[in-house]
Image (cartoon, helix red, strand yellow):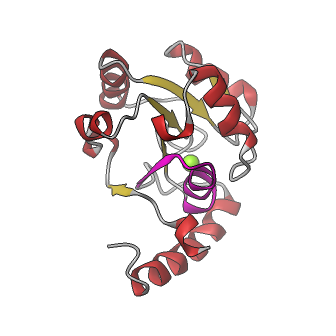
Amino acid sequence: MYRLLCPDTTVNTLHEIDLNDLEKRGIRGIIFDLDNTIVPWNSLEMCPRITDWLNEVQAKGFKVAIVSNNWQKRVKEIAQRFNLPFVSRAYKPAKAGFRQALVVLGLQPDQVAVVGDQLFTDILGGNRLGLYTIWVKPLATKEFIGTKIQRQFEKLAVLLLRAKGLMK
Ligand SMILES: [Mg+2]
């Protein structure tokens, strides 16, 4: 059970993600969470560095999709800027939203990485499907109240994972 909460890699920022390493692992597609992963929570402002990086990821040949638990209107607005396929109201950690994205990407679970800021939604959901999971620090401290509560459990989970030697 703990293992399902354990990301394959942890990074501080999106830019720390080693795209060459992903390529070597046979990863051909990346599923991104939206809120506090590529845009600050409930904001539509995107940092130019992230916009550039997302373009670079696609220029490198990775297929990209967004899977978010947020409402369609918001997810669509961001996804359309990059012409990306998206799944909104995904109810992560449920598998259905990720599965839908895999179909759109035309890839198998072992060819896809998921990048997200939350252990209990992005990482747990990705691990359940056998995706390569990358945990990134949240972009902003401003969050949905439910997420703030979940962060406390997240801290506990990290302590447990570290105690069990599953996470650095
Ligand atoms: Mg998020």
Quadrant of residue 168 within the rendered picture: bottom left
| Residue 113 among those drawn in magenta | no
Q: How many labels does the image show?
A: 0
Near-viewer residue (118 or 5):
5
Q: Position of residue 68 (x, y in %)?
A: 65, 38
Residue 75 in view of the camera = no
**Left or right for 78, reference 48:** right
Q: Where is residue 153 in the image (x, y as percent from the top left)?
A: 60, 75
Magenta: main secondary structure equals helix
Residue in view at x 27 percent, y 37 percent: 24
Residue depicted at x 56% and y 44%:
41
Between residue 56 and residue 49, name the one nearer to us: 56
Residue 116 at least partly seen:
yes
Q: Is residue 128 magenta?
A: yes
Q: Return the x and y of residue 127 as percentages of the image width and height.
A: 56, 55
Does residue 11 appear left or right of residue 38 in this picture?
left
Q: Position of residue 151 (x, y in %)?
A: 57, 68
| Between 79 and 104, the one nearer to me in the picture | 104
Is 55 left, or right, of 69 in this rendering? left
Asked if residue 140 is positioned above or below residue 66 in the image, the reply reads below
Question: Eyeballing the image, is 156 above or below 27?
Answer: below
Image quarter of the N terminus: bottom right
The residue at the point 43 percent across, 48 percent down is 139
Residues 143 and 56: in front is 56
Residue at 36% across, 58% down: 10
- Span highlighted in magenta in the image: 119-136
